[in-house]
Structure formats: C-alpha cells, structure tokens
Image (spheres, rainbow, N blue to C red):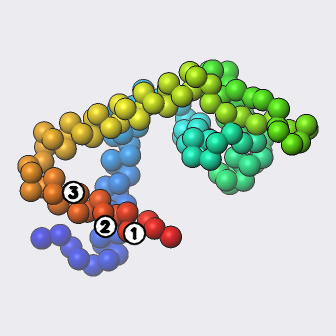
Amino acid sequence: MPEKDPHHLATDLGATVSLLMRQLRAVSHAGGLTASQRAAIARIDAGGPTTIAALARAEHVRPQSMRMTVGALEEQGILRRSPHPTDGRQVVFSFTEEGRRVLAETRQAKNNWLAVAIAERLDPAEQDTLAEATALLKRLIQE
C-alpha cells in the first residue's frame, strides 16, 4: 500500500512526474531543442504571437537571454518575426508552418508513446485507476 503521508506522497509524485516528463521529451522529435526553447514555443503556442520582452517576463529570464533563445528558434525556421501591430518599435514572434509541423510531430510522438505504454503495460482496471488519478491531478493544478 502506498505511503499516505502528504509530504512523502508529494515527493514521490513530483519525482514520478519528472521521470515521465523526461521520458516524453526523450521520445519526442524535438529532442534537439533546449529546455528554454521548448518553454518559449509552449508559451507562444498557448498565448499566440508575442514579443521577446513578454516571453522573458513570463519565463522569468532576462530579455537578452530570451533574445538568444528566440533567435535560435528563428534560425531553425520554427519562429518568424513580424511587425508589432500597434508599436512599430517592436516585433512579435509566431510559428512558421515548419514550427507548427514540428510542434504537432512532437506532441504526436509523445502521445503515441504514452498511449502504447498505457495499453501494453496496464490492464483495464489499472487504466481506470489512471483515469481517476488523472482527474485528481487536474483538480490539484486548478487555481
């Protein structure tokens, strides 16, 4: 029976989620992207086109650091720059078609690996338990 002490459970859950995320990154096709690059494209995917300053604030990094991160993504053809719609001094970054393709392939690879792992390693009752645990995890992260 698993330990029910909240501190022990929190430690075990955090470590397990960390290992799961590492495995998902390993099976994705975006393995060549740095953690900073993955964070930047996740922000742009969630929030739409944005400036380097806004990305830097959101990721709690210096604008110079974010400029390097975004520059590398631009060089790889994942992001493109365009004029800011209301401030001519700024530019916004958004996905290129190649960027959208990379993002979709990455997500599909992760999802495929996880779906196969669930189907092959868990019996139907365990899959039901995982579905219940997923609902609980969603409740934990709601703000």
Question: Mark 2: few, some, or many residues within 10 Å (few <14, many ≥20)?
Answer: few
Please give the name of the residue rendered at 76% of the width and 42% of the height, measured from the top-left corner.
51
In the picture, measured across the screen, residue 58 lies left or right of residue 4, that is right
Residue 21 screen position, x and y as percent: 38, 46
**Residue indicated by mark 2:** 136
Q: Secondary structure at mark 2?
A: helix
Q: Which mark is residue 45?
A: none
Residue 99 screen position, x and y as percent: 57, 26
- Which of the 4 quarters of the picture holds residue 16? bottom left
Please give the name of the residue rendered at 12% of the width and 70% of the height, measured from the top-left corner.
1
Q: Secondary structure at mark 3?
A: helix
In the picture, measured across the screen, residue 141 lies left or right of residue 69, that is left
**Residue indicated by mark 1:** 140
Please give the name of the residue rendered at 19% of the width and 44% of the height, measured from the top-left corner.
118
Does residue 33 show up?
A: yes
Q: Amino acid at mark 1?
A: Leu
| Residues at circles 3 and 1 in contact by the CB criterion of under 8 Å | no
Q: Earlier in the sequence, mark 2 or mark 3?
A: 3
Residue 54 screen position, x and y as percent: 74, 49
**Residue indicated by mark 3:** 130
C-alpha separation, residue under disc 3 versus residue under disc 1: 15 Å
Question: Mark 1: few, some, or many residues within 10 Å (few <14, many ≥20)?
Answer: few
| Residues at circles 2 and 3 in contact by the CB criterion of under 8 Å | no
- Which of the 4 quarters of the picture holds residue 128? bottom left
Q: Earlier in the sequence, mark 3 or mark 1?
A: 3
